[in-house]
Image: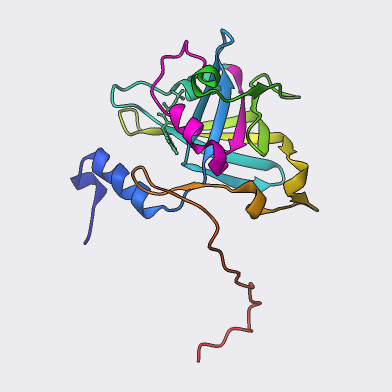
Amino acid sequence: MIITPSEHDYTNIYKLMIGCIVPRPIAFVSTISPDGIRNLAPFSFFNGVCSNPPIVLFSTVIRKDGKHKDTLNNVEATKEFVVNIVSEDFADQMNITSAEYPPNIDEFIESGLTPIPSDLVKPPRVKESHINMECKLVQIIHFGTGPGGGSTVFGEVLRFHISDELFDNFKIDPDKLHPIGRMGGPTYTRTTDRFDLIRPKAGEIKNN
Ligand SMILES: Cc1cc2nc3c(=O)[nH]c(=O)nc-3n(C[C@H](O)[C@H](O)[C@H](O)COP(=O)(O)O)c2cc1C
């Protein structure tokens, strides 16, 4: 099968991309509006960029009605956000926040998740999350202007909060974190079936 994106509707290309790029980590992003309304939403177009300085990114997609998501509007206005890592035990509550609530609705209240104060930024952290990253906005890059277009938000992590029980000398224990990843459609994955590959040095690799 050969697919040239320009020959297809963007909704099919979206479906294709979320099936091809798997599994995706999930940034559960807390923000606050200029009026002080707390917002929470998951974004699986998410990754790290580099560690010096520590930069993370996530992308918000323009809605079918052409509107930007509340998260993007809040980050643009306040320049701050928190990335909370999602564990399986609160996946259902995370999912609740992905419904399209109007901007005046507090998604901590809707989901029942617990806001706790951040140290360095205004948006609260999610207490149920084992890992929170307090971030300040570095840059936003916009791609496209219509539905399906996107904006990539780059933030610098000013502070990590990590539950003591899963932290050991800067290593995170995945058996205690229970992170989940997103596949295509409504499907998620656990990370319980893992294997190791030791990275070779150049010159050590023999093909036969
Ligand atoms: C697991 C998961 C991952 C998602 N990833 C993205 C994403 O990467 N980009 C995006 O624009 N929307 C994504 N969504 C949808 C948003 O969470 C949803 O549109 C939400 O209503 C946005 O909220 P907001 O308007 O409060 O920012 C995702 C939803 C789920 C459940």
The residue depicted at 33 percent of the width and 44 percent of the height is 185
Q: Which residue of the protein is positioned furthest toward the top in this rendering?
A: 35
- Ligand 1 quarter of the rendering: top left
Residue 8 colored magenta?
no
Q: Which residue of the protein is positioned furthest toward the left in this rendering?
A: 7
Q: How many marks?
A: 0
Q: Position of residue 66 (x, y in %)?
A: 31, 22
Q: Position of residue 162 (x, y in %)?
A: 73, 40
Q: Is residue 5 visible?
A: yes
Q: Which residues are magenta?
A: 78-106
| In the rendered image, the vertical position of residue 17 relative to residue 90, given as above or below | below
Q: Position of residue 19 (x, y in %)?
A: 34, 51
Coloration mode: rainbow
Q: Is residue 100 left or right of residue 45?
A: left
Residue 97 colored magenta?
yes
Q: Is residue 202 left or right of residue 61?
A: right
- The residue lying toward the viewer, choosing from 6 and 208, is 208
Quarter residue 32 falls in: top right
Quarter residue 151 falls in: top left
Quarter residue 192 falls in: bottom right
Q: Which residue of the protein is positioned furthest toward the right in this rendering?
A: 169
The residue depicted at 47 percent of the width and 13 percent of the height is 105
Q: Position of residue 92 (x, y in %)?
A: 47, 34
Q: Is residue 143 visible?
A: no
| In the rendered image, the vertical position of residue 151 relative to residue 173, given as above or below | above
Q: Quadrant of the N terminus?
A: bottom left
The residue depicted at 30 percent of the width and 28 percent of the height is 146
Q: Is residue 105 left or right of residue 113?
A: left
